[in-house]
Image: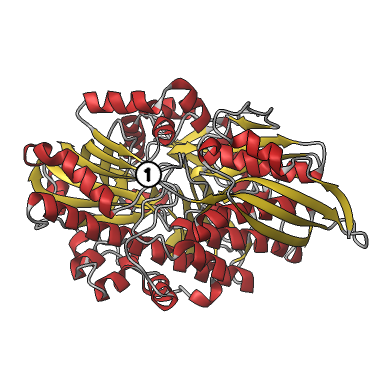
Amino acid sequence: MKRIRIAPTSPSVCTQTYMNGAEPRKLMFRILDHYTADVGVDIEADAPGGLFAEACRALAQITMDPDSVVPAQSRTLCIEKRPFDLLLFEFLEELIYLRDAEQFLSIDADCEVMQDPSDTTLWSLHAEVRGEPIDHKRHKLKVEIKAVTFHDFHAEPTRARVVFDI
Amino acid sequence: MTIPPMKEVAKNIWEIPASFKQGMLVPAHIVAGKDILDAMDDGVIDQVTNVACMPGILAPALCMPDGHWGYGFPVGGVAAFDLDTGVISPGGIGFDINCGVRLIRTDWTEADVRPKLRELIQTIAKYVPAGVGGEGSVSLTRGQFNDITTYGAQWCLDNGYASREDIERIEEHGRIRQADPSKVSTRAISRGIGQLGTLGSGNHYLEIQVVERILNPEQAQALGIQQGQVVIMVHCGSRGFGHQVATDYLKDFDLAMRKYRIHVKDRQLSCAPFQSDEGQHYYAAMACAANMAFANRQIITHFVRKAFADIMGTSKGMDLIYDVAHNIAKIEEHQVPSTDDSRPEERPQTRKVLVHRKGATRAFPPGHPELASMFKETGQPVLIGGSMETGSYLLTGTADAMRMSFGSTAHGAGRTMSRTRAKDEVRGQDVKARMEQRGIVIKAASMSGLAEEAGFAYKDIDMVIASLQDAGISTAVARMVPIGNLKG
């Protein structure tokens, strides 16, 4: 497998980003307001790893106040040999799964996204996702995302559009 | 987008001809009064005409007056497919499989309940978790969960959570028999096993309402409803279990479409031939999720009765009026035109078809063989949940619905505004204060969620109901207004 790029976000930067009272970082995603019942998001980054990390942050921003969650634990996610768009789709789906099946809230991630040298249409992901288990007393939760949809879905290495079902 | 030519082919039934878009196999019909039609978002036109292009669709593709942009199908969408040549599509059902509504009657009036309303809402909230990450109070083994997905609300009867009469008052008697848990992934079970008896979030709610107005006294009496009576409405679905079933098969169908050389106008309309292995497996898995949702609403009913018994001293008289699914696909008998092109004059035939309803409710007429005997005279009760600030309706199905909309009607008020815009317009705290001022006690899991569900983000429910009545596809029986709301 050929390594394309490691996500530009280091753990220390991420910690600063979401600690209460810290200087907010510039968001590389934009929540779209033209989907009547659901929520769309446009995401940009300078590389595939950053795109995936930014998608994780966008999901967190929609569903909770990320400042109320401490990146105290991590989960490792590996998804292999998928078309690029399906890799992003399954990564986001996995974050939703973690919330329901393990009660784990993901707020940030370090992501390595690699292109298969023998078949360049396929990509793989190794992600360290940070967050913590749900604590209803402390966490400010907004809304539950049910699923990632294929509607208007588009993903390429530095930009993507995703619509979530609320 | 281009606004299509529309012709009113019957009162409040607007036809978009099959010539409007390349690939349309049948015309599309929008059920709406003129005001509702004029205000409908463009996405509905685009999406309902996309649905009209799907293989094996039977005329017409429909959208109800509460319709709005959805993913794949519009919300409010109804489409029937030929069992042999047609497809099944998760995008025509929604991720929240068997999201639905149930209505429970009581013997109390507002005067009886008002002094204890806050306590009631708090107690219900203690028993029925709402919001993100809520875990239910029924703990289950995987074997028990499989039984729930197989037997639905009938599992609740066998395990002390339902009465025999409850089961009679649920669509499909609370169980779709084609369910096969072997067609469900372990991931889906892991997502849903801890969520039985929970509301979820988004537009899901549990509401204590008062019957404000009786619109059809004869039917109201037959259904046990009278003016001033307190009733409880529950709106939720199959939780993470159903969401994962839909997600799993959406991805499978994305690949299957290449195998079957099916092309759709929107990737979210991914589908497979109903008779293919993929189609049959999804139908069996979807039925499992539908059964879980029937059981979920029944378990919630059990705990609502318990909460009322705690606070009001009894749960006597808290009978189920009805429970409807509004995100589902079902095999039903309908009259469809002959498939023999050489004999267009031939009378319509009654045959089995696969009806998709996404944000639409079944509305079977009086005398329909699928209905329990208690509904033979009234027709099937239909429950339309409005926004939490306005009102909701009890309707019944009609023979015209069978003739014009595959036995279907609307499911709610229908959004007019995105969640993001609603939050820009109002704060959750202000919505809460406004509702409390009007005497509506509210307990919300999330203030931003409350802002998203503000009344102004929805269509006028009275206009939606008028559209249905004038089209003849439902009969309005009673209008209810909220006095207490537990919001997910």
On the image, the x and y values in percent for residue A5 come to 85, 47
* Rendered residue at 22%/71% (across/down): B160
The reply, left or right, for residue A114 in relation to residue B86 is right
Identify the residue under disc 1: B488
Q: In the image as oriented, which residue stretches furthest toward the top?
A: B425
Depicted A5 relative to depicted B292: above or below:
above
Q: Secondary structure at mark 1?
A: loop
Q: Is residue A165 above or below residue A21?
A: below
Colour mode of the rendering: secondary structure
The residue nearer to you, when weighing B163 against B63, is B163
> Where does residue B172 sit, x and y in percent of width and height?
34, 66
Query: In the rendered structure, which amino acid carries the disc numbered 1?
Result: Gly
Q: Residue at x 49, y 75 (%)?
A: B181
Q: Is residue B21 visible?
A: no
Residue B16 position within the rendered picture, expressed as x and y whole percent measured from the top left: 56, 38
When the figure is inspected, residue A125 is found, relative to residue A54, above or below; the finding is below
Q: Residue at (92%, 59%) from the top-left corner?
A: A117
Closer to us: B379 or B133: B133
- Image check: B102 left or right of B55? left
User: In this view of the protein, can residue B302 be seen by the observer?
Assistant: yes
Q: Nearer the viewer, residue B412 or B250?
A: B250
Horizontal arrangement in the rendering, residue A85 relative to residue B160 (left or right): right
Q: Residues within 10 Å of mark 1 (few under 14, many from 20)?
A: many
Counting from the top left corner in percent of width and height, residue A105 is at 54, 49
Chain designation of label 1: B
Q: Quadrant of the N terminus of chain A?
A: bottom right
Say how many tags the image has. Answer: 1
**Residue positioned 56% across, 66% down in the render:** B187
Q: Name the residue nearer the viewer: B334 or A64.
A: A64
